Amino acid sequence: MRIFENIINHKINTITADELLKYADQFNIIINRQQAAKIAAYLRGKNINIFDTVQRAQIVREIARIAGPETAREVNKLFTQFTK
């Protein structure tokens, strides 16, 4: 199971705006290109573990600051789908 977590975390840490938009569309989550670019820029290069609930909450708070609370809620839904 740990290998899947590593793969998902690696994808989150290297995600592009286009990939984020693709996943959002796949999971029926609404974000625009500008928001996706800001979020991807924030996530890229960080050593984020979305399976750690404390760390995920911190990330969602930062995304809320960057792109707004509604977008943060939507991205959190996406993270939740990835961790299932």
Image: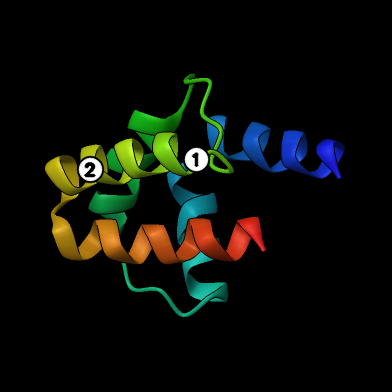
Residue 37 percent location from the top left of the image: 32, 43
Helix, strand or loop at label 2? It is helix
Q: Residue at x 41, y 37 (%)?
A: 54
Q: Residue at x 51, y 28 (%)?
A: 48
Q: In this rendering, which labeled residue sits more in front, label 2 or label 1?
A: 2
Q: Residue at x 40, y 74 (%)?
A: 29
Residue 82's quadrant in the figure?
Answer: bottom right
Which residue position holds label 1?
A: 16
Q: Is residue 2 above or below residue 25?
A: above
Q: Is residue 22 left or right of residue 54?
A: right
Q: Earlier in the sequence, mark 2 or mark 1?
A: 1
Q: Residue at x 55, y 30 (%)?
A: 13
Q: Is residue 23 above or below residue 30?
A: above
Q: Is residue 82 left or right of residue 50?
A: right
Q: Looking at the rendering, in which quadrant would you find the C terminus?
A: bottom right
Residue 1's quadrant in the figure?
Answer: top right
Contact between labelled residues 1 and 2, with CB atoms less than 8 Å apart: no
Which residue position holds label 2?
A: 61
